[in-house]
Amino acid sequence: MGKRILLTALAICLSCLLAACQGQNPPPDESRPVEETVELTVWGAEEDQALLEQIFASFQAHYAGQADFRITYQPQSESNCKDVLLGDLEGGADVFAFADDQVAALAAAGGLDPIADETAIRSAALPAAVEAASVGNTLYAYPLTADNGYFLYYNKAYFSDEDVGSLERMLEAAAQAEKLVTMDWSSAWYVYAFFGNTGLEVGLNEDGITNYCTWNSTDGSIRGVDVARAMLDIAASPAFSSRTDQEFLEGVRDGTVAAGISGVWNAVALEELWGSNLGAAKLPTFTCGGRQVQMASFSGCKLIGVNAYSRHTDWAARLAEWITSEENQRLRFEVRGQGPANVNAANSPEVQSAPAIAALLEQSNYSQLQRVGGKFWDPVTEFATSMAQGNPSGASLQTQLDRMVEGVTAR
């Protein structure tokens, strides 16, 4: 009898212990959701691939466990991103880098939605970058860089500080050293430099599509033909060469080029090539209509957009914020030499002391946001190519200016 009681008591104790253990370790909740798979395609400049893959890795590490990320990078030029994306919005990238002059068209076509948390983005970015990323008062993209402009690079071994103030003096010094000064006249973006501070105007009409242009004006203190003649005089110098950015770098590498007009994207390469002889300054003046005119420039920003048709817009927005964060804009400056749009990063001692950034900031006093319609580019390139070649057709300069403006303002 005693044994039976003892066994019964032991059985009860074991049952209680088993129940307690089961209470401490409940079975898995079968209703718990499976981890989400998030596939994102990102478009960016070909030169940014290594940097972006580093940023993707830190993003995935930060959000580890919240989703199964599959991020695919595809190289895509920032300058024509709009055209490619609008060709197939639903099949386009979820996150993409683009030049700020495309933001209005992308927003109008429904490719971009207004930024949800725009207050935080506005407060973190430079005012000019916020303006560049907005349509009216609505923010549509994330500011990435505030350095999409151009200025002068030069080799200090051939030019003094006084030389680089005047394009004519630079050409004289370069000719004596049997070197070249380059600028890309096959790009209307750079050609704006000669017209921008003359009182002659170009810009968008209220429809946001067509242009107005007075570059062929026969009135005023500086006329269109004065600019054309100035360009012909520059082209006639044996020390001048119209070259693309890539050809500019090739000339620096082979030692034939001593100066050129370009942007911050070439800062790292030029520092490697010229070392302590690397100089950077605002654009020089040039002789036009019997006076010295400060060369102008288009300015702009690179932006990150989120495709409104993305299947994962929330995660795409988080990735866009991550790419444009202060930390990653600092990293972009360190790796690529690009000027941050983030206020704190832009005001850091490292950025402020960079020669290319300092030159860009100085040139910003003579620049304006690029706001022109698509009909601007080809007619200006055609005109400038003729000037770079010394007007081989012999056609009247006024006739060529009139034809250019007719093309730029076409509806």
Image (tube, rainbow, N blue to C red):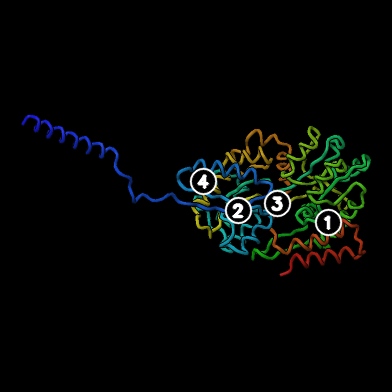
Q: Which residue is mark 3?
A: 368
For the residue pair 389 and 266, the one nearer the viewer reads as 266
Distance between the alpha carbons at the discs numbered 2 and 3 = 24 Å
Q: Secondary structure at mark 3?
A: strand
For marks 2 and 3, give the one nearer the viewer: 2
Residue 261 picture location, percent across and down: 79, 46
For the residue pair 298 and 84, the one nearer the viewer reads as 84
Q: Which residue is mark 4?
A: 120
For the residue pair 157 and 36, the one nearer the viewer reads as 36
Nearest to N terminus: mark 2 or mark 1? 2
- Disc 4: CA contacts within 10 A as few (<14), some (14-19) or many (>=20): few
Q: Kindly check if marks 2 and 3 are in contact, taking CB atoms under 8 A apart as contact.
A: no
Please determine whether, in this image, residue 54 is positioned above or below residue 131. Answer: above
Q: Kindly check if marks 1 and 4 are in contact, taking CB atoms under 8 A apart as contact.
A: no
Nearest to N terminus: mark 1 or mark 3? 1
Type of amino acid at the residue the image marks with label 1: Ile
Nearest to N terminus: mark 1 or mark 4? 4
For the point 87% across and 50% down, the residue is: 241
- Disc 2: CA contacts within 10 A as few (<14), some (14-19) or many (>=20): many
Distance between the alpha carbons at the discs numbered 1 and 4 = 45 Å
For the point 72% across and 48% down, the residue is: 149
Distance between the alpha carbons at the discs numbered 3 and 4 = 26 Å
Please determine whether, in this image, residue 117 is positioned above or below residue 403. Answer: above
For marks 1 and 4, give the one nearer the viewer: 4
Q: Kindly check if marks 2 and 1 are in contact, taking CB atoms under 8 A apart as contact.
A: no
For the point 55% across and 41% down, the residue is: 58
Distance between the alpha carbons at the discs numbered 4 and 2 = 20 Å
